[in-house]
Image (cartoon, rainbow, N blue to C red):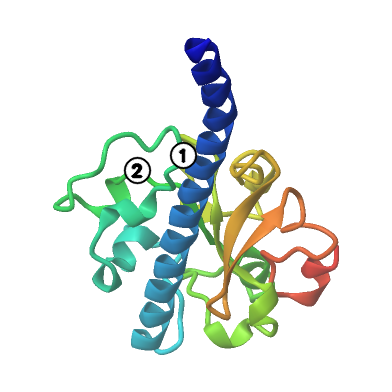
């Protein structure tokens, strides 16, 4: 009888513990995005109002490294591909990473061509509370940027990491929000900064 009661209690508690663990991982992911977004804001302030170059030889994790110290921020606990904690002495570009930086492709595509250095001025962002700076990428994908030009939003953007129905996003106004799957792209493309592409 006692064993049966224990089995029933365990059956009731295990799903609750699992949900609690998932919630804790999601909060850790949200906090990491907040800190990376703050690092990006400090980078912009230090670099005359420009985001990191999207075609530099080093990528955004290393470019922002001065403004964060712990490489663990780069990996969401729900990203199964992230693996063991990285050595903080390594290049940030080589560390396990769960996030994409906005590649600002629609802005660069609208400039007179050819564009040799892709650096995006913060002043171009008209709706900071509705413009994504960072989003989550599919487990194991090597992409650093959300690239509307190449269409990797269809293959690399992770839109269902948390509870199977959404993901966390960091916005240009400093906020971090959970969005349901698909809503970062429609009805408004929150990755775009030019009005025609936002409303496509």
Q: Give the answer, above or below, for where 73 lies relative to 66.
A: above
**Residue at point 42% right, 33% down?**
81
Camera-nearest label, 1 or 2: 1
Residues at circles 1 and 2 in contact by the CB criterion of under 8 Å: yes
Residue 35, image quadrant = bottom left
Q: Residue furthest left?
A: 89
Instruction: Pick whichever, 28 or 186, lies toward us.
Output: 28
Q: Position of residue 164 (x, y in %)?
A: 67, 38
What residue sits right under mark 2 in the picture? 96
Q: Give the answer, above or below, for where 31 lies relative to 45.
A: above
Tell me which label, 1 or 2, sits earlier in the chain: 1
Q: Give the answer, above or below, for where 115 lies relative to 126.
A: above
Crowdedness near tag 2: few (<14), some (14–19) or many (≥20) residues, C-alpha within 10 Å: many
**Residue at point 48% right, 69% down?**
116
Q: Position of residue 76 (x, y in %)?
A: 44, 47
Instruction: Pick whichever, 160 or 59, lies toward us.
Output: 160
Residue 175, image quadrant = bottom right
């Amino acid at each position: 009888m006692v064993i049966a009661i224990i089995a029933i209690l365990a059956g009731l508690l295990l799903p609750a513990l699992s949900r609690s663990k998932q919630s804790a991982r999601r909060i850790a992911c949200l906090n990491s995005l907040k800190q990376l977004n703050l690092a990006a804001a400090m980078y912009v302030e230090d670099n005359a109002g420009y985001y990191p170059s999207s075609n530099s030889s080093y990528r955004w994790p290393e470019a922002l490294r001065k403004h964060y110290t712990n490489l663990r921020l780069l990996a969401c606990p729900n990203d199964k591909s992230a693996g063991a904690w990285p050595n903080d002495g390594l290049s940030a570009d080589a560390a396990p990473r769960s996030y994409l930086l906005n590649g600002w492709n629609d802005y660069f595509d609208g400039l007179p061509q050819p564009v040799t250095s892709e650096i995006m001025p913060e002043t171009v962002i008209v709706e900071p509370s509705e413009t994504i700076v960072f989003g989550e990428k599919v487990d194991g994908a090597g992409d650093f940027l959300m690239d509307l030009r190449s269409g990797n939003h269809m293959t690399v953007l992770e839109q269902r990491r948390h509870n199977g129905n959404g993901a966390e996003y960091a916005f240009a106004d400093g906020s971090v929000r959970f969005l349901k799957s698909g809503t970062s792209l429609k009805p408004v493309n929150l990755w775009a900064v030019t009005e025609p592409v936002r409303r496509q």
